[in-house]
Image: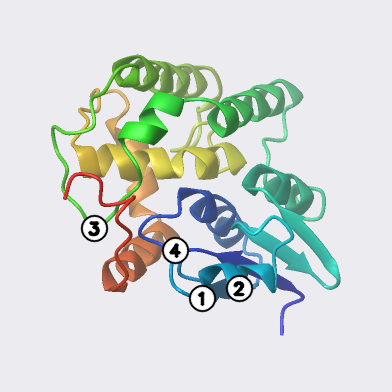
């Protein structure tokens, strides 16, 4: 049995759970998945059994607990090669855009919550959302043009930066956000990942419904 355990929430809704899950899958890291559906009658009690923050995701490595998606990815990158770009300049930018995703884009998060099962095309364009979308597309374009030669992802090979932006791809898919032609291959590459297809299939098989996630019906 793997010494890693990853506690996650509902795959349909939990964008933060997707990030380290996908990074670990892409890095070939073996782990046990513990899924705790959120906002259920016993969710808080079950989360408290694992997570000191009471939130997901949580990485358990032997007796160590790491919470927060980006902290989990950073911890794993210290133990497993290839999760960040090898080039120092590319790695610095990858960390910067990952941190921006981690702390920013509040309007997008609020108005376009991740909901893989829904088709909300045309919805969610609240105040600040167009600006967030433009900034994300600018990040993708800049990373691809400067560092993406030789691969389909932001820095060529898949990295933690792609895992950080994968839930945005899912949001764009659900809300029908138009993807410029030059960025369509990147968008398609994320969706084509076998791990990503597996996450989507599992999301569609879930039966839980969270009202705060089904914000447009």
Q: Nearer the viewer, residue 27 or 152?
A: 27
Quarter of the figure with the N terminus: bottom right
Query: Is mark 2 in CB contact (under 8 Å) with mark 4?
Result: no
Q: First in sequence: mark 1 or mark 3?
A: 1
CA gap between label 4 and label 1 equals 8 Å
Q: Which mark is residue 45?
A: 2
Identify the residue under disc 4.
Answer: 39
CA gap between label 1 and label 3 equals 24 Å
Q: Which mark is residue 94?
A: none
Residue 198, how many percent across, how many down? 38, 66
Mark 2: give few (<14), some (14-19) or many (20+) Cα within 10 Å. few
Residue 164 in view, yes or no: yes
The residue positioned 50% from the left and 28% from the top of the image is: 148
Q: Is residue 89 above or below residue 195?
A: above
Query: Is mark 2 in CB contact (under 8 Å) with mark 1?
Result: yes
Q: Depth-wise, is mark 3 or mark 4 nearer the camera?
A: 4
Query: Is mark 4 in CB contact (under 8 Å) with mark 1?
Result: no
């Amino acid at each position: 049995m793997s010494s890693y355990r990853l506690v996650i929430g509902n795959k349909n809704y939990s964008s933060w759970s997707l990030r380290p899950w996908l990074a670990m899958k892409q890095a070939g890291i073996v782990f046990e998945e513990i899924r705790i559906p959120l906002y259920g009658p016993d969710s808080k009690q079950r989360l408290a059994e694992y997570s000191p923050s009471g939130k997901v995701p949580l990485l358990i490595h032997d007796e160590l607990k790491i919470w927060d998606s980006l902290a989990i990815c950073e911890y794993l990158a210290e133990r497993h090669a290839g999760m960040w770009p090898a080039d120092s300049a590319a790695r610095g930018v990858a960390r910067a855009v990952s941190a921006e995703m981690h702390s920013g884009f509040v309007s997008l998060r609020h108005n376009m919550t991740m909901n893989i099962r829904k088709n909300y095309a045309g919805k969610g364009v609240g105040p600040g959302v167009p600006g967030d979308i433009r900034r994300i597309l600018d990040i993708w374009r800049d990373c691809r043009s400067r560092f993406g030669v030789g691969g389909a992802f932001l820095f060529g090979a898949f990295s933690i930066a792609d895992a950080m932006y994968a839930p945005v791809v899912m949001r764009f898919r659900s809300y029908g956000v138009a993807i410029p032609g030059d960025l369509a291959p990147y968008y398609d590459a994320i969706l084509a990942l076998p791990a990503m297809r597996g996450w989507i299939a599992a999301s569609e098989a879930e039966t839980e419904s969270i009202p705060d996630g089904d914000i447009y019906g």
